[in-house]
Image (spheres, rainbow, N blue to C red):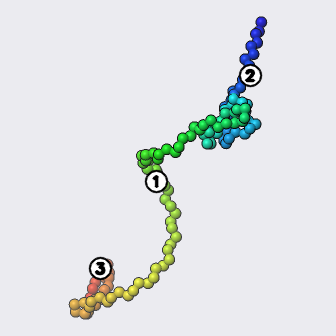
Amino acid sequence: MAQTIDLGKIVGSQMHNVTAAPGASLGIVGDWALDTVAGDIYEKTDSGWTKRGTLKGPKGDTGAKGDTGAAGAQGPKGDTGLTGAKGEKGDTGTPGAAGADGKTPSLAIDDNGHLIATYE
């Protein structure tokens, strides 16, 4: 023969995850709520949700610098850039000194491909 036992009303049987203070209609007296954004913990009492504490402490000190990571693979070659504007014409250079005897040779290439200088 089956036997039934009344365990009574279960009060405060749930933990609710919320993203701000819980709304008045959420849960029953004895329930708890965790604000997953702010880290605040609330208990539902006869008068509504009561903040009981927070899981987040003050901001900590900056951590030590981590090790440098390995170098990444070389990227692909980029496209050729555009041709720049033509530069300005340069100044005329200073004339060179005259030759020792002031004569200029005439130059020619003979039938064998040799450069021949002839002085007058």
Q: Quadrant of residue 54?
A: top right
Side of 3 relative to 38 (left or right): right
Is residue 34 visible in the rendered image? The answer is no
Q: Which residue is drawn at 67% across and 33% down?
A: 43
Q: Residue at x 73, y 32 (%)?
A: 46
User: Label 1 amino acid?
Assistant: Gln
Q: List the residue tagged with mark 1.
A: 74
**Residue at 50% across / 61% down in the picture?**
78
Q: Which amino acid does label 2 sit on?
A: Lys
Q: Name the residue under label 3.
A: 114
Examine the rendered structure and indicate whether residue 39 appears above or below residue 119: above
Q: Quadrant of residue 17?
A: top right
- Of residue 19 and residue 80, the one placed in the foreground of this image is 19
* Amino acid type, label 3: His
Q: Residue 22, percent across and down? A: 70, 39
Judged by depth in the image, the label closer to the viewer, 3 or 1, is 1
Residue designated by label 2: 9
Q: Nearer the viewer, mark 3 or mark 2?
A: 2
Real-space Cα separation, disc 3 to disc 2, in angstroms: 118 Å
Where does the N terminus fall, quadrant-wise? top right
Q: Which marked residue is nearer to the observer: mark 2 or mark 1? A: 2
At x 53%, y 43%, the residue is: 58
